[in-house]
Amino acid sequence: MAFHVLITDPLSEEGIQPLRQAENLEITIVTDLSKEALLQEVKYADALLVRSQTQVSRDVIEAASNLKIIGRAGVGVDNIDVEAATEHGIIVVNAPDGNTNSAAEHTIAMLTALARKIPQAFNSLKMGRWDRKTYIGVELKNKTLGVIGLGRIGAEVAARAKGQRMNVIAYDPFLTEEKAQKMGIGFGTVDDVLKVADFITVHTPLMKETRHLLNEEAFAKMKDGVQIINCARGGIIDEEALYDAIQSGKVAGAALDVFETEPFVDHPLLTLPQVIATPHLGASTVEAQESVAVDVSMDVVSFFNGEAVRNPVNLPSVSKEVLAKIAPFFTLAEKLGAFLSRLTDDVIEEVTIKYTGELANYDVRALTRNTVKGLLKRNLGSHVNDVNAKFLAERFDIKVNEHKTTTGKGFLNLITVEIVTANAIHHVSGTLLNGFGARIVKVDDYAVDVIPEGHLLFIKHKDQPGAIGRVGTLLAEKNINIATMQVGRSTIGGNAIMMLTVDNHVEQAELASLTELVDIYEVKAIDL
Ligand SMILES: NC(=O)c1ccc[n+]([C@@H]2O[C@H](COP(=O)([O-])OP(=O)(O)OC[C@H]3O[C@@H](n4cnc5c(N)ncnc54)[C@H](O)[C@@H]3O)[C@@H](O)[C@H]2O)c1
Ligand SMILES: O=C(O)CC[C@@H](O)C(=O)O
């Protein structure tokens, strides 16, 4: 029987040779499909291969009743509803490394073209003008490049910018001063980067935390005359704020490869002479397209041959028997990791997951991966999944330990997650209460009983009369309804914590006013 592979974005012909050579695969290539046509075509597909243009949304996945694997010839899977694919048991594979070099080279090309106004000068020459006065540029040498997001592409860009004799300063939540020193670059917070950079380039994934990372407030912190490059994802920059910042003269120029909405035919930013742009061409080289197409094609071939795939984005890998025992703990494990990631803003160096009780009799590696996924998700968003979580932890120098003990007190099963940072050790324990669902039962040294769901507030305070009341009053003033509240203390009159569940997300400004209350030391909002 032949499996039907549908390709809906242009892929390199050389890159798809592994598919053509496979005897059990039939290939259909149809690009530029309307949504309706795509919904029709996917009905018969066993595999779907795309680049960034085809939107593999939930309705597409639901229309594809035969679909078993989705291949993304590139890095970002933000055009694929991975959650829906996982729910439908569809494996998603991508090609995370194949276009790193091309995207980094494109960023450097955009940086140079921006600094020397090459596209503008070329346009003017084509219009019949020999104008040498308007297009005075600036040198890159000795200028500071701010890199926000120092992953695969950001790190390559930083290395190349050093070759241009630029000073580089970077911010990445996984970057330590020591690592930056080794790379020969400066290390700072986002604000440090914004304040000192002459050019700023972003290389983060697009997710809740990075949407509009460069907004009106961020532009205000930058040097006058700063220039901006985005070859990562549209939406990391607030395009309206960028437009205003260019109009006001704050930003001298911008080079954009990606946009909040793609594709488009006209765009307000392109009416500004200070803006140069390409239509999402970062990965558009012969080499990158061949490489990413080969990577996904090989994975599709392996998959239909019953072999392991190399770049799974969502693949569960546990035997059915073990899965039945540990599956109920998947969500708890991920939430414990996510909880701890919100408890600290420090760089995490080590994480230890301790399994106590019955669970310790099983292969719990899938739970460990889920915990690490929860821990990393704060900064990596959809780039991390239970399959690549441990690999990514290694890449960011986070040591992952797993401990098991079958004898424990109090709970039939207990998962305790501990993180070590340069400044502190934090831990959280959780369990599944028979018939009552998941509970967080301990945070640091405090016993609690909290459902790990929704919007939580973790407050460290002094055990003094009035502290709890002040928090309650302030939240009421802000119209934030408290659903549940737990209090724990170490000694009478000593350090204490409050764990509140509230009905809505608590904004940064509201957190700041809570921190200003008497006897309140620290407040963290944790959305689970
Ligand atoms: N223009 C193109 O054609 C093209 C080609 C390839 C990749 N991309 C995009 O480039 C981006 C980077 O890709 P990559 O392969 O380097 O990914 P990566 O996962 O290797 O790196 C992303 C980095 O961003 C960091 N990060 C997350 N949140 C952050 C924050 N708030 N502030 C600072 N850093 C943060 C992460 O810690 C990580 O190190 C992605 O958005 C990807 O989709 C675009
Ligand atoms: O398909 C493309 O050309 C874009 C790829 C790029 O945005 C990626 O995330 O890999």
Image (tube, rainbow, N blue to C red):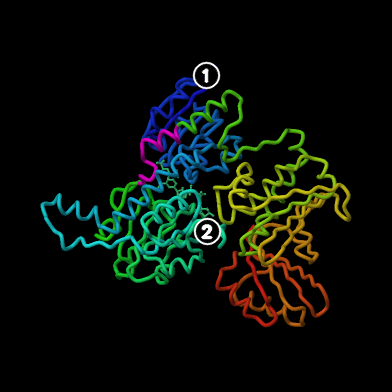
Q: Residue at x 68, y 59 (%)?
A: 340
Would the CB of label 2 be found within 8 Å of ligand 1? yes
Q: Earlier in the sequence, mark 2 or mark 1?
A: 1
Res 94 label: none
Specify few, some or many for label 1: CA neighbours under 10 Å numbering under 14, 14-19, or 20 or more.
some
Q: Is residue 105 above or below residue 215?
A: above
User: On the rendered structure, is 16 left or right of 309?
Assistant: left
Residue that numbered label 1 is attached to: 24
Residue 283 belongs to magenta span: yes
In the picture, the quarter occupied by the C terminus is: bottom right
Q: Give the residue type at disc 1.
A: Asn
Q: Residue at x 33, y 46 (%)?
A: 279
Determine crowd level at label 2: few under 14, some 14-19, many 20+ residues with C-alpha closer than 10 A. Answer: many
Q: Are marks 2 and 1 in contact (CB under 8 Å)?
A: no
Q: Secondary structure at mark 1?
A: loop
Q: Is residue 166 left or right of residue 123?
A: right
Where is residue 80? Give x, y as percent: 50, 42
Magenta span contains residue 364: no
Looking at the rendering, which quadrant does residue 238 occupy?
Answer: bottom left
Q: Residue 208, position in %: x, y? A: 52, 57
**Residue positioned 55% across, 52% down in the render:** 380
What residue range appears in magenta?
280-293
Real-space CA distance between mark 2 and mark 1, rounded to the nearest whole angstrom: 44 Å
Kind of residue indicated by mark 2: Asp
Q: Which residue is label 2 attached to?
A: 172
Looking at the rendered image, the disc whose residue lies closer to the viewer, 2 or 1, is: 2
